[in-house]
Image (tube, coloured by chain):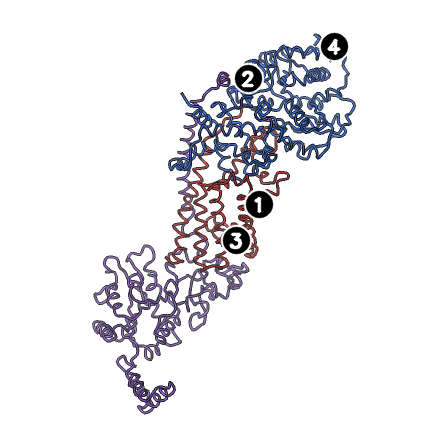
Amino acid sequence: MSTPLQLAVNAMKEQIDAPIASFFSSCVHCGLCADACLFYTETCDPKYTPIHKLDLMRSVWSREYTLWGKVLKLLGLNRAITDDDLSKWQELVYDSCTLCGRCSMVCPVGNDIVYMIRKMREAMVVSGHAPEGLKDATVRALETGSPMGVSLTTLEAQIKHAEKESGLSVPMDKQGADYLMLLSSAEIAQFHEIIPAVTRIFHEADVSWTLCSEAFEGTNSGIQIGSSDLAAELLERIVSGAEKLGVKYVISPECGHAYTALRWEGPNLIGRPYSFKVIHILELLDELRQTGRLKTEGMDEMRMTFHDPCQLVRRGGVIEEPRQLLNMVATDFVEMKDYGKWNWCCGGGGGVSANEAAESLRLKVFERKKKQLDEIKVERIVTACSNCRNMLEDGLDENNMDIEVIGLTEMLAEKLTSQKSATSAGDN
Amino acid sequence: MRRDETLADYLKQQGISRRGFLKFCAATASMMALPLGATEAIAKALSLAKRPSVIWLSFQECTGCTESLTRSSRPTLESLILDAISLDYHHTLQAASGSAAEEAREYAMQQNKGEYILIVDGSIPVKDDGIYSTIAGITNLQMLKDTAQHAAAIVSVGSCAAFGGIPHANPNPTGAVPVMDIIKDKPIINVPGCPPIPVVITGVLSHYLTYGTIPELDTLKRPLAFFGDTIHDRCYRRPFYDQGKFAKTFDDEGARKGWCLYELGCKGPTTHNACATAKWNGGTSFPIESGHPCLGCSEPDFWDAGGFYQPISTADFDVNKLATTAVVAGAAAGAAFGLYNRHKKSSAEHQHHKTSTDELKE
Amino acid sequence: MSAIELLSWARGPALQFSVAVFIVGILIRVLEIWILGRKKDLSEPKAAGFSAGMRTIFTRSLPPPGMLKYLISGYIFHIGFFVVLFFFVPHILFFKDVLGFAWFGLPNGLIDGITILSLASLLYTLSIRLSDPVRRMLSNFNDYFAWTVTFLPLLTGYLAFHRHITDYTLMLAIHILTVNLLLISFPFTKLTHAVTLFASRWYNGAIAGRKGVKV
C-alpha cells in the first residue's frame, strides 16, 4: 500500500522522459517564462514563474535520473519532496496555470513547460492533490458523460429547438455519415445556437454528418485534471461511438482542450491510432470555404477582433482558418497587438474555470486581456471556444466593459446564404 | 694577481713604487678627513688586500656556460680572472689536473673560509646516492655540500644549476636537481639561461665584488637587474604582435618581414631574461632577431613546457588522444547510467497506479 | 611553486584533467537524457516534426515579440564570449593545434573592447539576478557559481593580456586555471545548457511543428 507521496513520486518517475530531462538540464533560471505568463505579469508574484511550478518534478528528476543528483542525494544535499510540498504546489500547478503555452514559446533554451505541467498533474491527481472543483467535474464527466452534468435529455431538448428554428432535421446516430459532430457541455447548456448553426451550414454545404447519443461530449476533464487513465476512459467513448457509426471524421467542437484531447493526445491515450481523422470545426468550415461550399452574403461592419483559444492556436495548429473565415463576413476586423500564436490566455483554460478556488486569481489576471482590448477598442470579440467565451464574458462583466462576445461558427451561420430549400425534419 | 699575491706585490709588478703607493694613501686619508696615523692604517690594510677567492664547481653540465663566459667582453674573462678574482678551481680553465687540482680547491677553501664565492654550473644528480656524476671519486652531491659549507655565497650559473636544466627534463633518470634544492642555508643567486648571456654572468659577479652584497632577486632568486623583464616586454618585434602580424612558417612572408614569432612557439611572454636588450655576441643579435622563437631557456623546466614550436596558448599534451579516450569512457559510462535510469523508469511504469473515479470522490 | 611551474601545471596535468572531466561528464549527461527516450506519438501529424525542430534550434535565438529588452544583455554576453573565445589569435592557435585547421582572427583592440562589453553585461545580468523578484526567487548556488566560473576566465584573460595586476606568467597561469575550473564545472551545473539546449529546442520545435505551429 503506497502513500500518496510515494504514488506522486512514482508517477513523476513514469512521466519523466528524454524531453523533460533535456528541459531540466537546459534551464538557466533566466525567468523569461514569467514575463510571458499572465499569472505573473498581472500579479507580480514570483511564485507563479512557470518553471518554478515544476520544481518538485525537477527535484525528482535530479535525485532519480542524474548521476550528480544521486551523489548529492547521498551527501544529503538534495532533499526529497514531501507531502507538504505537494499541497503547496497544488495552487501553482492548477490554479495559476491554464496550460496556455506562452511560456513554452519564449523559453530561450527551448523548454516546453506546458508539456511538463501536463505530466506533473499526473502525479498530483494520483496523490489526491487536485482541486475540488476539477475533481467534481471529472467525476461528473465519468459518471454522467458531461462535466457539467448535461444529459442526453438536455441535448435532445436543444435539438428540438434547433430543428424548429432552422426547419431542418438534426441527424442523430446516423450510420455511415461522413462526419461525427461533437459538442461541449457549455454549448449544449448555454451557447446552444451552435446546433442550428452547424445544421444550417452543413445542409447548405452538403455535408453528411451526425451526432452520437453515446458520445456527444467533446470536452475531456481527464486532460484538464491531468490523468491519462481518466482521459483515456472518456476518450474511448468517442472512439467507440465513431467506430460504431463508421464515420470518416470526428469534428472537434468550439472548445480549446477538446481539440488537444481528441486530435493530439487521443491516440496516445488509448494506445492505438484512430480509424478516423479528427478535424476542428473551423478547419472544416475553412475547407468548405476553399471549395466554395460555404457561401455567405452581407458583411458585419462592427469593429471586431478574434480571441485565439490557446489550445487551438499555439497548442493546436489552427491559426489561419479563423482569419480566413472572418474575412468573409467582417469589414472592420482588427488584430490585437499580440495575436495568433502570441495571444494572451483568457485565464480560464486548463481546468482553471472549473476550479472555484482559482476564481479571484482568474479574474485578476483578466487584466491582461483587458489591456489587450483597451488598445484596440472593439465592439465585438469573436472566438471559437465556449470556455473562452464564458471567461471573456465574466471578465468583461467584472471590468464593466461593453463588448459583445460571439462564437465564429454562429457568426458565419448568421451570414449564411440560404440557397437550398429547407426540408422538413426527418428527410435528411 | 696571483692568488697569494697581495695588492702591494701586484702594484710593484705594475711598476708603481712604494713611495707612489704611500702618496696615494695619504691623499686618500686627507680627502676623507681622517686623523694622523690613518695613512699608515690604510697603507697597511691595502697592502695586505687579496683578490676574492672563487671556486667553480662543474657538475652535470655541458660546459656551455663556461663557453658563454669566455665570450664575455665587459669585463673580459681574462681581466676578470687575472685582475678581479682569484679563480682557484675550474675544470676547464685551470692548469692543474688530477689530485693537484683537488688539493688546490681544498687549500683555497681552508685559506678563505667563510669568504670565498662558490660558482656552480650543471645540475646535481641525487638518485642512487648521486652516483651518476662524480669527480675524483666524490659524488657531485657530496662535493657541493662540502664546498658550500664555508662559502660566503653561491652563484648557480646556467639553467642546470639554477633549475635542474636539461638533465632534469622528463623522465629525469639521474634525479637531477638544482643547487637551491640541496643548499638551504647559504645565499644563492640563480643566473639561468641555456647558456646565460655572458655579460649577465660577469655582471652579477661584478656586483658582488663591488658591493659585497647579493643584488635584488626575484622569487626564483634571479637578479632583477637582468631578469626583471620578460623578452616580450622588451622585444623589438612587439609592434607586430600588437598589430596581429605573425609569421606562420619559417620562410613565409611574415618571417621574412620580421614579424612576431608567437605562432611559431615563441616563449618570450613568459621568459624573463635580458636577451632583448643586452643581446648576445657583444650586442649583435638574439634568437628572435635572427628569426627563431625564444625557447624560454631561463625559466624552470623550459624543456618540458610543451614543444619549442608550440605557441604558449596551446595545450601541453595531445588533446585529441585524450579526447578520444574520454569520449569512449564517457559513452560507456553514459550508456550504463542511462540504461539504469531506463530500467528505473520501466519499474515505475510497472507500478503505475490507475486512478479510479472513487479516488476522486475521497 | 613558481609562476612558470604553475603555468606548466595549468596547461598540462590540470588541463588534461579538466578536458577529461568535461568530455566524460557531458557525455554522461547527454546519454542520461537521451536513453530515457520518449513514447512514439501515434497522432497524425500535420507537418514534419524533425525539420520543424531543426528550424527552432535557430529561430529560438531570436527575441519573442516585445521581449528584446530582457534579452539584450544575454545576447551581448553570449556573442561577446564566443567572439573572444574563437577569434582571439592565441585562442585560435589552441584550436588549430587540436583541430588541425584555423581561421582568421580579429584585431586585439576589438577583442579587448568586446571582452569589456561581455564583462559589463555579466555584471548587469548579475545585478538583475539579485534584484528582480523572479530571478532572485529562482536563483541558487548553482546559478551564482556558474556565473562566477564564467566571469573569471574573461576577467583573468583581460588582466593577463594587459599585464595590469601582476607578472604575466602568473596571470596567464591563473587564467588557464579559471578555464579549467569552467570546464570542470560544466557537467555539474546549468552550464550544460550549452549542449542540451539543442535537444530542448529541437523537442520543442518538433512537438509544435508536428501540429503545424512554428515556434
Among the chains pictured, the one given red colouring is C
Residue at the image position 34 percent from the left and 57 percent from the top: B169
Query: Circle 3 — which element?
Result: loop
Of the image marks 4 and 2, the number of the one nearer the N terminus: 2
Residues under labels 1 and 4: Cα distance? 65 Å
Q: Which mark is residue C75?
A: 1
Query: Residue type at mark 4?
Result: Thr
Instruction: List the residue tagged with mark 4.
Output: A423
Query: Circle 2 — which element?
Result: helix
In percent of width and height, residue A124 lies at 49, 25
In percent of width and height, residue C52 lies at 58, 33
Q: Establish if A158 lies above or below A265.
A: above
Query: Circle 1 — which element?
Result: helix
Residues under labels 3 and 2: Cα distance? 62 Å
Q: Establish if B9 lies above or below B154.
A: below
Residues under labels 4 and 3: Cα distance? 81 Å
| Residue C117 visible in the shown view | yes
Query: Residue type at mark 1?
Result: Tyr
